[in-house]
Image (cartoon, rainbow, N blue to C red):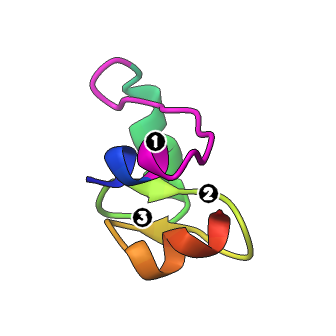
Amino acid sequence: MTKRYLTENQISFEEVNIDNEPEAIGFLKDQGFQSVPVIFGGQQAIIGFRPDQLKALA
């Protein structure tokens, strides 16, 4: 849903798929994250599908 929202609202993003890049799991864990998706941008990371916060990226 997050990826669809970003695409539909023409917000550019770079996807890092943890299935294809398992080293990304270590990075996320080191940062304290325990779930995906994590969106980096703006003032702080957005965890999960949060349209209210994603809108601020537009």
Question: Which residue is farthest top?
Answer: 20
Q: Which mark is residue 40?
A: 2
Residue type at mark 3? Phe
First in sequence: mark 1 vs mark 2: 1
Residue 18 image position (x, y, % from top left) = 34, 32
Q: Are marks 3 and 1 in contact (CB under 8 Å)?
A: no
Say which element carries label 2.
loop
Mark 1: which amino acid?
Thr
**Residue designated by label 3:** 33
Q: Residues within 10 Å of mark 2 (few under 14, many from 20)?
A: few
Per the model, the C-alpha gap separating discs 1 and 2 is: 16 Å
The correct choice, above or below, for 39 with respect to 16 in the image is below
Q: Which residue is under mark 1?
A: 7
Q: Point out the stretch of residues depicted in magenta.
A: 6-20
Mark drawn on residue 39:
none
Taking depth in this image into account, of 1 and 27 the one nearest to the observer is 1
Cβ atoms under marks 2 and 3 closer than 8 Å: no
Q: Secondary structure at mark 3?
A: loop
- In the image, residue 17 lies in the stretch drawn in magenta: yes
Task: Identify the main secondary structure in magenta.
Answer: loop
The answer to whether residue 21 is above or below residue 15 is: above
Q: Earlier in the sequence, mark 3 or mark 1?
A: 1
- Nearer to us in this view, 3 or 58: 58
- Which residue appears at 61% of the width and 57% of the height? 40
**Neighbour class for label 3 at 10 Å: few (<14), some, many (≥20)?**
some
Residue 1: x percent and y percent? 25, 53
Mark before the other along the chain sequence, 2 or 3: 3
Identity, as a three-letter code, of the amino acid under mark 2:
Phe
